[in-house]
Image: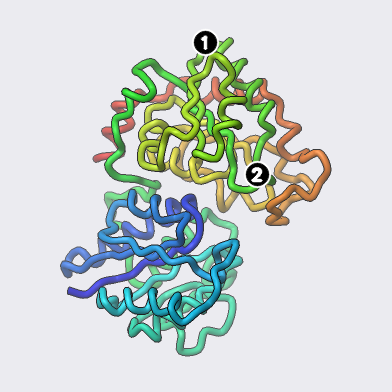
Amino acid sequence: MSRVLVARLDSAGDVLLAGPAVRAVAAGVSARSNEVLMLCGPQGTAAARLLPGVTDVFTWASPWIVDPAPPVTEDHVAALCDWVRGRQVEEAVILTSFHQSPLPLAMLLRLAGVERITAASTDYAGSLLDVRLKPGEDFPEDQPEAERALQIAAAAGYRLPTNDDGRLRVRDIPDVAWLVGTEPYIAVHPGAAVPARAWPPLHHAAAVELLIAAGYRVVVTGGPAETELTATVAGPDALDLGGRTDLHSLAGVLAGASAVVTGNTGPAHLAAAVGTPVVSLFAPVVPAVRWAPYKVPLELLGDQNAPCRLSRARVCPVPGHPCLSGVEPEEVVAAVQRLTTGVTSLPTRRETRNA
């Protein structure tokens, strides 16, 4: 049995956006009884385990992706190469964003014996890649990240079957009624991996109060390090799930929501993967055309022409964080109201996803 490796070394959201490309590879290799393995960084492993088509996941902290970066040592490199050799990987598809190079990983995979490697590279790749796409020439850069990944997979010879619409998907969505109850709700996820992408906490809290006053039930989610934030945002009347979910159970929470309010974060893409409409508080430090929630009903809020535009800043470079702080809580409530008008029921959405 031969195996194809799909690599995406950064965050959970990026891994979820790679899901359609992973399914394309899986569809191509299944007829030969081969397997699709996934190589991820520490932040992306949990998301990779949720993707349809993945049979195994290896976690490796890339020294050119992870921040803070691990040291480059013989043992660290050997851990990756030994795993690749041990799993008899014959082919690799390296998925990257526009600002990332696939070449360091391609070199390590070559040393580990991988015979065929496909990736997109601005730089000359020499013998490191068998199939090289040139960004901006072979495909446009201003397109959704999921479609960029699909084009890389297609260059390797893998395409989605005709009955796959290319939406984001996850498998084994759990029933979390024991955690959230059975009444309809709006999910609010106020955290963000970097400050430049976060709407102010008190704005979130005000939006939650207004949503509850408008008759919505609100569930606030966040990781173990965000419990103070979720408590502030939830206040006395919303259900605070801060620190009470992992990525798998969070998928169930978001799947049960009528809409999700969040920034440009992994949970935004997880919401898209379970088919839930998203109010996206999107800071323009990266382009929304590439990283906005994909193929779900969407309300995009935030000044996309603010001075921080395309800066890729982790901390807002503009005093007052105007791109997001200028969004009023009332605008979020209005966006939720627009999205929840005519939204299909949870059972209907689940039937569609599992078809």
From the viewer's side, name the closer residue of 14 and 61: 61
Q: Quadrant of residue 134?
A: bottom right
Q: Residue at x 59, y 42 (%)?
A: 192
| Residue behind mark 1 | 215
Q: Residue at x 68, y 52 (%)?
A: 314
Q: Secondary structure at mark 1?
A: loop
Q: In the rendered view, does 349 fall on the left or right side of 96?
A: left
From the viewer's side, name the closer residue of 342 and 263: 263
Residue placed farthest to the right in the image? Answer: 319
Does 24 sit above or below residue 268?
A: below
Q: Residue at x 40, y 42 (%)?
A: 247
Q: Quadrant of residue 80?
A: bottom left
Q: Secondary structure at mark 2?
A: helix
Q: Quadrant of residue 299?
A: top right
From the viewer's side, name the closer residue of 352 and 108: 108
| Residue behind mark 2 | 197
The image position of residue 150, as x and y in percent, is 42, 61
Q: Quadrant of the N terminus?
A: bottom left
| Colour theme | rainbow
Does 272 sit above or below residue 70?
A: above
Does 71 sit above or below residue 226?
A: below
